[in-house]
Amino acid sequence: MWKQGEFIELEIADLSDIGDGVGRWNDRVVFVPDTVPGDRAVVRLVYVKPSYARGQIEQLLEKSPHRVRPSCIVADKCGGCQWLHIDYQYQLEAKRHQVIQGLQRIGGFAQPPVGPMLSGSQCLGYRNKVTYPVGLSRTGLVQAGYYQKSSHQLINLNQCPVQDPRLNPLLLEVKQDIQKHGWQIYNEHNHTGLVRHLGLRIGRHTGEMLLTLVVKDWSIPGIYDQAQEWLDRYPQLVGVCVNRNRERTNAIFGEETRCIAGVSYLKEQFAGLEFHVRADTFFQIYTETAEALLLFIESELNLQGKEVLLDAYCGIGTLTLPLAKKTRQAVGLELQAEAVEQANLNAKLNGIENAIFHTGAVEELLPNIDISLDIVLLDPPRKGCDRSVIETLRKSKPPRIVYVSCKIATLARDLKLLCEDGLYTLTRVQPADFFPQTAHVEAAAFLTLSTLL
């Protein structure tokens, strides 16, 4: 029975950190996409190892009470979301459980102090940014959408239930305009063609939009007239940009972006401040939940206006600048020069004069900070902090550390290192749902130097 192609009957008991249902069969683990804890199903084994397997649901024998009807007609095919078939309240419970499990299993924290999930008011229509691969159908029609699960087969979308609904008309109509002009669609197999991706972005609070085409080469016949037509057609569209990516790569954006109509940024209100956000700027996908997490961080830190705060991996100052208004001084470290340029601009826009930004790798800049720090805020990419960053913090011993993470495994790993030998104490972990309908979870962890407790 334990071989590829065989059928087994399985009860789903848990969810993995990538969103698959998890069941056990004769003490072996089976991962099954599109299932929910409480489901009982006939499962076909599609990939088999001695101790675990991946399966595919063939027949649902008994439905979980947490199973719901997906709000998307291509939910069973599209790889953009994993959990549209799961009741949202149960999604929140599963994500909190995922945080607890990661901190226990990887971090070694027996009873991690994890609070209830923080979530926005919407579990659909929340995404302020989408970037769609562009392709061709078998009949030659221009398509844009997400790839089918575990494949490079494009699932065409004319609307998407998790993106801000104000972007839906652009998704449908821009494809038709690309078709009309006959712009060649990029072929990743032979590295030919022109149009690679369609990027859409919106300011949730302002409604301003940006449209970006990612192309292989700058020469796009008729693009300037078309860009102006888009600005005329969509009153909320403030800019049309073109990004060139000439590399044979899975990375979406290339290094250079040009604005060809309107302006190169949209204005957004975040935490009471105005930000300029460009096409390729990192900005949290769910604006309202990011604001709620920031408010929680401010409350937990109980800022008195006298603190010196350092924000590592600060980006365009999304967290640095609101926190600067409540501290004596804020220092931001960021690898990308363009992001630092935007951070300085955003500081100037809001009249914030006590924020200083430095360009460079955090592991290189942090050891040379020659001011006494009260709080260090870490918000690294998914891979977590470089080991040398952890070692620098253990040597310099800032009284408080806040670690914001989008990957629980690397968060748990780094927290374990910081708390080694009892140097720091983990006092609170606040999980937040930045990506409803997916298995992704964000969390802010608060550490206090143990000698202060």
Image (cartoon, rainbow, N blue to C red):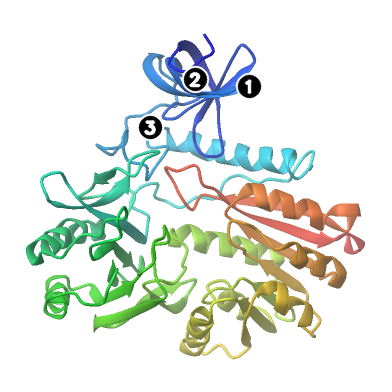
Pointer 2: residues within 10 angstroms few (<14), some, or many (20+)? some
The CA distance from mark 1 to mark 2 is: 22 Å
Seen as rendered, the residue at the extreme top is 1
Q: Residue 435's spot in the image, x, y percent?
A: 46, 50
- What residue do we see at 27% from left, 49% from top? 160
Q: Residue 220's spot in the image, x, y percent?
A: 18, 74
The residue pinned by badge 2 equals 38
- What residue do we see at 56% from left, 39% from top? 17
Q: Is residue 376 left or right of residue 251?
A: right
The CA distance from mark 2 to mark 3 is: 13 Å
Give the SS element for disc 1.
Answer: loop
Residue 51's mark?
Answer: 1
In the image, residue 422 above or below residue 367: above
User: Marks 2 and 1: in contact by CB < 8 Å?
Assistant: no
Q: Quadrant of residue 74?
A: top left
The residue pinned by badge 3 equals 85
Which quarter of the image is occupied by the C terminus?
Answer: bottom right
The tag earlier along the polypeptide, 1 or 3, is: 1
The tag earlier along the polypeptide, 1 or 2, is: 2
